Image (cartoon, rainbow, N blue to C red):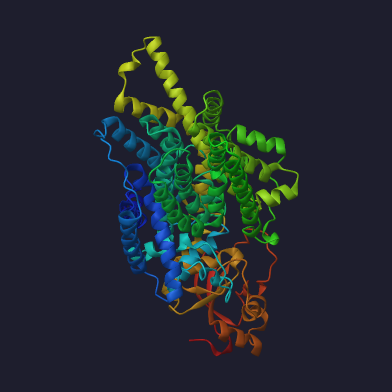
Amino acid sequence: MMELLGDWFAFLPTLLLTVTLLGLPGLALGLALRLRGWWLAAAAAPLSVSLITVASIVGGWLSVPWTVLPVLGLTLVAVVAAVAWQRWVGVRAPRTRRGPVGPSRRWAAAIGVTLPGLVIGFILARGMGEPTRIAQRYDNFFHLNAIQYVLDTGNASPFWVGSMTAPGNLLFYPSGWHAVGSLIAQLAGTGVPAASNALVLVVAALVWPLSLIVLARTLFGASAVITVVAGVLSAATPAFPYLPLHYGTLYPLFLGLALVPVGIAAMIRASRPHRCPRRHDLVLLLVLLVPGISVAHPGALLGMLALSVPAVVMLGWWLWRAFPARRTRISVVAGAAFLLALGVLTLRFLRPPATEIYWPVSGSLANAIGEVVSAAVFNYPVAAMLAVLGLIGVVAAIRHPSYGRSVALGMGIVGAALYIVVAGSPVEILRTWLSGPWYNNPPRLASIWAIAALPLAASGATVLARWIRRRSKTMRFGMSRFQGAPALGALGVVLLLLTQGAAVRQAAADIEYVYGPNGEVDGPILSVGEYDLLLELDEHTPKDAVIAGDPWTGTSFAYALSGRRVLMPHLLMDETSAAERINTGFATDADDPSLCEALEETGVTYILDFAGGPFMDNQGGFEGVEKLSRSPYVRLVAEEAGARLYEVIACGLVR
């Protein structure tokens, strides 16, 4: 136990560096944009991700090696441009006298950020076991190896990272996660797994609660109560942030969705039908947020646009009623038609290829509706308290409508509709059009549902808290004196206890499973012996080694864990003819001239042979690098339980 605590204590500098990397560039730009308070705190990470992703694109175009220097350079340019904008374009807001921030507001900020941060951080850290563990999931082969690929090639551009698995294919791949992760690994001097875990913890436990709080405050006002309940509720559902961290893993979408609430809040403020002297500043902020969200994952950008539709509809409705002139109403109708056409085109062209949209419904239509109503999306246990609070929020929006409540209700309807369609609609063409951009994949829409549902639940929690306070005064319970920090602290703790039920416990168990159940590295893909051998590869192989092996048994993790290149950095990729020749024929034809040519072309000098069976059904094609214990073409170099490392001695390659 002491050794484990020591590992986490030694990990703190990496966490602090991650906070700095996600905070400092965005803070500098935010200050130049005259953001203050919650907006400055919540927009810092999204702006930082935008700066990092744009720097990666520019650096790729200019062939500048990927380090923190391009980020610092772009940040300086952006800050200067923002200062110039404010000096010559921006309209200075009228001066208003503001009193000092009261202690209740300060306590609310501390409680709203600290409570969910501690809970989310604890669940994730306990699930990880150690800061250098890896999530043993299908997609994490790519995500971990892509960070190492960026470190090796010095290029983090979204038009480059995909070439790791598709050589020569420089089409777009969302690389925001890998760009940030590679900088953490560089600056902290740590391995890829530790850098990835640091990014997971900071985004989930800090960036996400801040993001949700600023959305709730934009919708419902800047009260201390809404700050506390929105923060606490950010840790109340498995659908986000936990689901993308054990399903997939969907790290790029996870990063993008954590930033989305800030983008929605900016959209709401920019489109709100009221006099706003700095509206163009808000539009500029929204434009600056888009690169980070979209390069993190286009699905996150589409989620932001979908959940922003109610705010745009409210603006159109207000314009229709406030300006009855025929010309104005024709303009409103034309604008609505244009936006509708733009939305259809966006869905059409941002939808992935049909071959990648293959997830079926997860249940019946009635079951999907029931999951939404009971806050039990993707077959999680019922989250009763969250469901009740959401229902109260819906009733309050209907009985006592306001702009914020109406927009929140619209967001809830959009999020619920998208999930119901993807999880239970029997009409496949409807699923293809509405949920196709998210691969018809229910877990992705479940996470978007969480972003839509939590503001409604926060509104419901606020209504309930105020009702309890009024009742306490009427019945003379004496709670009227229970105010300020004690009341806010009690509210946060009680709400936390009521929402950390079976659903969150299941999410915690899922996180623990993918990192290795019961604190062991023996997980869903790698056995203890296989994991240990991967960690020892740098002791047994030279830096320029290229390692082959059946990726379906976990050998592809060798790249991220040891820094040694592998023939197959992912499970499904564009195999060259030389790679295919080795994967299918080495065990029987290693002395064939064509195979010797393949070894020379690929540089393969070592082979990992893991005894564990494939963790998923696959179509084979790797029989040439399996069961080599009696092969005359290799020499055993190292061995752990169920795992062997061989050196190729065929074709005169022995060293």
Q: Judge left or right: residue 448 versus residue 279.
A: right
Q: 496 or 77, which lies in front?
A: 77
609 above or below 377? below
71 above or below 107? below
Image spot of residue 242 (x, y percent): 50, 46
Q: 465 or 506, which lies in front?
A: 465
Q: Which residue lies furthest to the left in this view?
A: 100
For the image, the number of numbered tags is 0
Q: 392 or 581, which lies in front?
A: 392
Name the residue at 52% across, 27% down: 401
Q: Judge left or right: residue 358 versus residue 200.
A: right
Name the residue at 57% across, 77% down: 168
Name the residue at 32% across, 44% down: 93
Q: Is residue 151 visible?
A: no
Image spot of residue 514 (x, y percent): 53, 52
Q: Judge left or right: residue 5 versus residue 255.
A: left
87 above or below 232? below
Image spot of residue 185 (x, y percent): 38, 64
Image spot of residue 405 (x, y percent): 51, 32
Q: Can residue 164 be seen in this view?
A: yes
Residue 326 location, quadrant: top right
